[in-house]
Amino acid sequence: MARKNVTLSLEEGVYEKYQEYCTKNAVALSRSIELFMEKRLKDEKDE
């Protein structure tokens, strides 16, 4: 599947804390957001 670059506007503190979390846990920030989006879509479909 093709990749899409996006620009997000986030609260700076939240972004920095989440970025630190991802670094400490060897998680790709973009992949974790992608998984979150996939889960939300699946949950909506299951309702």
Image (tube, grey):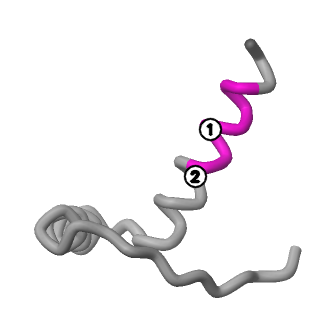
Q: Is residue 24 magenta?
A: no
- The span from disc 2 to disc 1 (Cα, nearest Å) is 6 Å
In which quarter of the view is residue 20 placed?
bottom left
Dominant secondary-structure state across the stretch colored magenta: helix
Query: Which residue lies at the image location 60% right of the left edge and 50% below the top edge?
Result: 37
Name the residue type under label 1: Lys
* Residue, disc 1: 39
Figure check: 47 above or below 22:
above
Q: Position of residue 41 (x, y in %)?
A: 71, 38
Left or right: residue 17 compared with residue 10: left
Left or right: residue 6 compared with residue 27: right
Left or right: residue 2 compared with residue 22: right
* Residue, disc 2: 35
Query: Which residue lies at the image location 73% right of the left edge and 32% below the top edge?
Result: 42
Q: Position of residue 14 (x, y in %)?
A: 18, 62
Q: Is residue 40 magenta?
A: yes
Residue found at the very far top of the displayed protein: 47
**Do tag 2 and tag 1 residues touch (Cβ < 8 Å)?**
yes
Residue 20 image label: none
Badge 1, how many Cα within 10 Å: few under 14, some, many 20+? few
- Can you say which quadrant of the picture contains the C terminus? top right
SS assignment at label 1: helix
Left or right: residue 9 compared with residue 16: right
Name the residue type under label 2: Leu
Query: Which residue lies at the image location 50% right of the left edge and 72% below the top edge?
Result: 30
Q: Position of residue 35 (x, y in %)?
A: 58, 52
SS assignment at label 2: helix
Query: Which residue lies at the image location 46% right of the left edge and 75% below the top edge?
Result: 8
